[in-house]
Image (tube, helix red, strand yellow):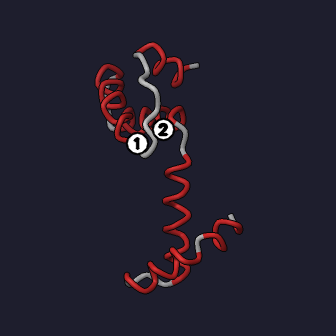
Amino acid sequence: MLERRTTHDDLVDHLVRTTPLQRGEAARVVLDVLAYFDETAEDFVRRRHRELQAKGLQNVEIFERITAELPHRAVTPPAYSLRQLRRIVYG
């Protein structure tokens, strides 16, 4: 993480100049955004399944939503079948 802080100082500086964020807050935002985009498709599927399940949704609707959301990720993953999505979640 320390490497990312020094590598992205220009972005942190930009956020400090253009937003009300303090330097530490801006650095955390940058690290959070980078972590978000580092998430693999499989990790995304597992995370979204947990989130949607916690909201009380059933698997049919959960997997429909995940299938609809996947193409809108920063790096579009391959198209997963329903079977592949279940395998990612349940092994």
Judged from this view, the residue extending furthest toward the right is 2
- x, y percentage for residue 86? 47, 18
The answer to the question of whether label 1 and label 2 lie on touching residues, with beta carbons closer than 8 A, is: yes
Residue at the disc numbered 1: 73
Q: Position of residue 73 (x, y in %)?
A: 40, 42
To which quarter of the image does residue 24 belong? bottom right
Q: Which mark is residue 18?
A: none
Q: Would you name the residue on which mark 2 appears? A: 44
The residue drawn where x is 64% and y is 70% is 7
Q: Is residue 39 left or right of residue 18?
A: right
Above or below: residue 56 compared with residue 8:
above
Q: Residue at x 39, y 37 (%)?
A: 54
On the rendered structure, is 29 left or right of 7? left
Q: Quadrant of the C terminus?
A: top right
**Residue 37, position as x, y percentages in the image:** 50, 50
User: 42 or 53, which is in the foreground?
Assistant: 42
Q: Position of residue 44 (x, y in %)?
A: 48, 38
- Residue type at mark 2: give it: Phe
Residue type at tag 1: Arg
User: Which element type, helix, strand or loop, lies under badge 2?
Assistant: helix
Q: Dot 1, how many residues are within 10 Å of its Cα: few (below 14), some (14-19), or many (20+)? A: few
Residue at the spot 43% in from the left edge and 46% down from the top edge: 74
Q: Residues within 10 Å of mark 2 (few under 14, many from 20)?
A: some
Quarter containing the N terminus: bottom right
